[in-house]
Amino acid sequence: MKLTHVSPFALAALLALSACGKKDIEELPIPGDAPPASTGQTSGIAPGSQADFMQQMGGKEIIYFDTDRFNIDDIDAAALQQQAQWLSQYPGKRATIEGHADERGTREYNLALGERRANAAKNYLASLGIDTSRLSVISYGEERPVALGSDQAAWSQNRRAVTVTID
């Protein structure tokens, strides 16, 4: 194939593609060398840490509530059971349960509702065998939203209780 006219852009693209074809040769271990020592932690996350809790929960450190409600439904119960399992694995760990509300309602009402939500989660964890002396609650009411906006999508994300482990 004879190229009589090649645009500068096509030439640059051709050169870039040809450079991508080279691969580095992977170093292979020398026979008889010992493999690197394993620490047992592949992720670098310390067992029993807040990062470990977050990783193990996979989003289930948060439970959500309906408007003006603080009851634990089946989805919340499953999340709290997973939290209780982790807390049972690390009996020296303590946790704070943060209660939150959406922006609707008075500040006082939302603080009280956040506290009822946090206490509902705490009581459920206690019913699963977690000692209440390891659990504390705090209500932020509407003061710490995770979603900004004045619509159903934002409000549903802000009506929550969040479990945070304490180191």
Image: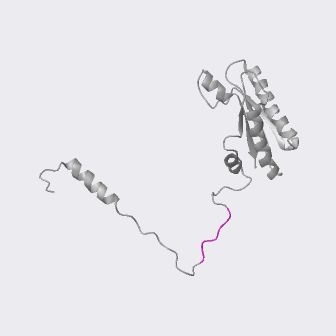
Tag count: 0
The stretch drawn in magenta includes residue 119: no
Is residue 39 a member of the stretch shown in magenta?
yes
What x and y, as percent, mark residue 148? 59, 27
Q: Residue farthest to the left?
A: 4
Of all residues, the one furthest to the bottom in this rendering is 32
The relative height of residue 117 versus residue 82 in the rendered view (above or below) is above
Residue at 76 percent of width and 33 percent of height: 74
Q: Is residue 27 above or below residue 140?
A: below
Residue 70 place in picture, x, y as percent: 78, 26
Judge from the rendering whether residue 138 lies leftward or rightward of residue 45; answer left or right: right
Query: Looking at the picture, does residue 121 appear above or below residue 10?
Result: above
| Residue found at the very far top of the displayed protein | 105
Which quadrant is the N terminus positioned in?
bottom left
Instruction: Give me the residue at 76% from left, 39% from top.
Output: 78
Observer-nearest of 45 and 35: 35
Residue 133, horizontal then vertical, whole percent: 87, 43
Q: Which quadrant of the figure has residue 14?
A: bottom left
- Magenta range is 34-40
Residue depicted at x 57% and y 81%: 32
Which residue shows up at 78% across the image and 36% down it?
A: 77
Residue 60: x and y in percent read 70, 40
